[in-house]
Every structure is written in C-alpha cells, then in structure tokens.
Amino acid sequence: MDTAPPDDTRSRILRAALERFAEQGYQRTSLREIADRLRLTKAAILYHFPTKEHLVLDLVEPMLTDLEGLLVEAGRHAPERARWVLVEGWIDTMLRHRRSLGMLFHDINMLSHGPTFQRLMRIAMRANELVAGPNASRRDQVRAVQAIAMCSDPVVFFDDVPDEVLRADMLDGPRRLFADDPPARTGGAPAATDGPPAPADGAPRSRAGAAVEVRVEATGAGDGGRSATRPGPGPGGGRRRSGRPPAMSPAQVATARRMYADGAHSADEIAAHLGVSRATVYRHLAAG
C-alpha cells in the first residue's frame, strides 16, 4: 500500500492532489481546489508544481519506476520463471501503489499523449511479452494480456480487502489460467460459475470485467503484427465471434484523436462513441 510521504508542503500537495484526482477525476480537479483543501494560495501550489501535469508525473513516477525495475528483474530469469516473477511482482507493485493505480483507473487521460503515456505503454507491452514467453502463439499472447489484467483490476475493485488477503486471491487467477490441465467438465453439465454467464458477444458483464492497465493489446511478431486480443477461429475452425471490431478506420482514428485532444472525453466515452473497445482506442492513441 502507498506509504505516506513526509509532512512537508510539497508532500502535502501531492497527497491532496492524489485524493482529489481519485475522488472526482483529473479533468474536474483544479489547482485552486487543491490549494483550498490545504489552505494554501494557488501561488504556493505553482511554486512547487507549475502545472497539473507536473503533479501527475510526480504521483505516478514511483509506480512506473518500480514496474521498470520489475521488468529488468524478470528478464534475468528463464522464461517459465520469468513469467511468475513478473506476475507476483506486478501484483505486489499494484498493491504497493493502490491509490496511484486508482487515480489512473479513474482517468487515464491525465497522462495525455506525452512521454509518460508512452512509457506506460512500453512497460505494459514488455510485461505481456515476458508473461507470454518466447515464440508465443496468438493464444499465448491473449492469455498474457488477461493475466496482466488479473494482476491489476482487483486492486481497484476490492480496495477494502487487506493486501495479504487480496494478494492470495489475485495469484489464484493466473495460476488457473496457466494450468497445464484445466478442470474438465463431467456429466455433460456446464461448469459451475460464481455468477451469471457472460453475454454471447463476449462483452464484459460489468466494468469490473474490463482490463485496467495497463489494458494494452500485445502485438505478436509471429502473427504479422495482428493485435493479440483479436478473436480468432475456435478449435473447430468456426467463424469468429461477433463483438466490437479490433481495429479502427482512418476516419475513426482521426475522430478518436480529436476527441481525446479536446480533453472533454474519456477513453471509455470515445470507445462507446466509435463502437470499439477501450484497448483499441488506447492502441491507436499510443501510435499517434
């Protein structure tokens, strides 16, 4: 869990900004509100942080630094061990920076199109590669993206669960995902689930089912640059399931970038407007 920084003015500003961004979003929080909360002048805020962007960079820097260190550490191991060093370390990092992750989850737009956004994308792509392993098939890449989501989303949605309890629960998901022999169905009956079945179009049942993070689509060299999250034929060679398109037309890309640049629309709103997934929106924004 995030450790409270020393009680100096700069640290107080960062704490107040993190609270406001997590509560009501980056776009709706002004420097004046942060100043009023601390009974400071706006000039005092600007002395330490010339813009809101500077505040955000300071808030996410510790988490990004930890994730980059984790990538280096995992990369030192053989592929199978690297996967679990990455998975366990990713969960530990997300738990250590719970509030920062919640802030990003609330409004990823706060990172804009700058180098920090690109840095986050590179971290996510490298994490997907390490989890998927060398010579990964498309299905391996899909499972890697799913695993990273398992290591992020619950931290936001179960913020009242103690770290050690949630960590154990979160590790259970990737272990099941990568099990060599998943439990077989018996007697012809459907496997039991903890909730209602997912919709036929593959859309998540709720917001909790979406990938958070780092929610980036991995691209596999062996698939000719196709997105790792693009659905493919089933085992029987049947048609791909219907759902939101995995790519956008040039006109849609231009619309998405214009809406994003306006600063008035979240990635969720852009995705809903264009009828695509949020991950697809992120992929095209990152490529801009």
Image (tube, grey):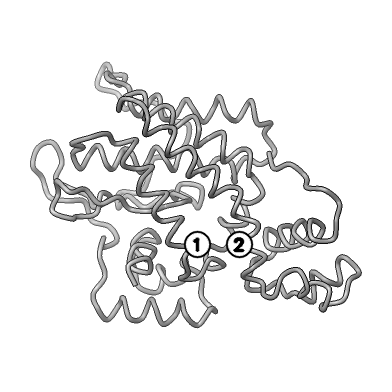
What distance separates the C-alpha of mark 1 from that of mark 2?
7 Å
**What amino acid is found at the position of numbered circle 2 in the picture?**
Leu
Dot 2 lies on which element? helix
Q: Position of residue 120 (x, y in %)?
A: 46, 55
- Report the front residue among 42 and 176: 42
- Report the front residue among 283 and 288: 288
Q: Quadrant of the N terminus?
A: top right
Q: In the visual, does 213 lie left or right of 129?
A: right
- Report the front residue among 16 and 259: 16
Answer whether labels 1 and 2 touch (C-beta < 8 Å).
Answer: yes
Q: Number of numbered discs present?
A: 2
Residue 116 circle label = 1
Dot 1 lies on which element? helix
Tell which residue pokes out farthest to the right in this image. 39
Residue at the image position 37 percent from the left and 30 percent from the top: 76
- Report the front residue among 154 and 96: 96
Residue at the image position 34 percent from the left and 35 percent from the top: 131
Residue 57 circle label = 2
Q: Position of residue 162 (x, y in %)?
A: 69, 31
